[in-house]
Image: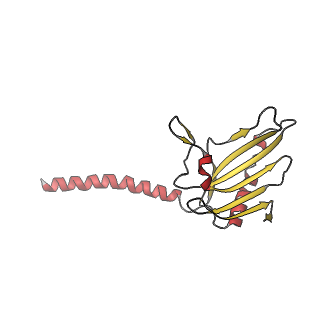
Amino acid sequence: MIKVNVKMIVWMICILFIPLSLIGCAKNEESSGETKIFEIANTEEVVGKKDEELVTLRKHYMILNPPKDLTELKQLVEKYSKDHPVEGEMKVIEGKNRIFDMSFYRESEDLPRDWQPDESYMNTDRLEHHKNDLIAYIIWSDAEPQKEYTVYDKSKEGMVMKQMHFIEDQLVE
């Protein structure tokens, strides 16, 4: 009787352990240390009123395992911007100036890779609540086509430790 119970317990442990270890392996594979950038779904915004001459396209991205060096971070978001142009996503409207705004966030406990905005009745969670995880920013317009880059080194709590601002490749103090 005791041997049967021990065997049964061993089988149950094995049945639970194998799937859990496979899930752990998949999770480790996702966070292998490789730097990846992807657009955060459901966060694109087009802002502008009919009587205004400005229309702004805001896009938000997540960087998994961003480089610590701010110059490398700037080069990473610059390359991403060139490889994934957004100007074609918003047509030219006669008499209106288009502004393009790309924000890049790091993954954190508060902003996980699968984060989505929440506008439910009792809970509101928008990207503006996650400025602590904003680590890079690009802005330019039809009128001012030179891209401005701002990159941040932030503490885990979101305090800015170091900041660099570039206009194209020129570091600006």
Observer-nearest of 172 and 62: 172
In the image: residue 134, left or right of residue 115 = right
Residue 139, image x, y percentages: 76, 51
Give left or right: position of 120 versus 17.
right
* Residue for point 72% across, 58% down: 150
Q: Residue furthest bottom?
A: 69
Q: Residue furthest top?
A: 50
Q: Nearer the viewer, residue 4 or 109?
A: 109
Residue 104 percent location from the top left of the image: 66, 53
| Quadrant position of the C terminus in the picture | bottom right
Report the front residue among 39 and 5. Answer: 39
In this rendering, the answer to whether 37 lies above or below 54 is: below
Q: Position of residue 80 (x, y in %)?
A: 71, 55
The image position of residue 27, as x and y in percent, is 48, 56
Residue at the image position 78 percent from the left and 56 percent from the top: 148
Q: How many discs mark residues in the rendered view? A: 0
In this rendering, the answer to whether 75 lies above or below 4 is below
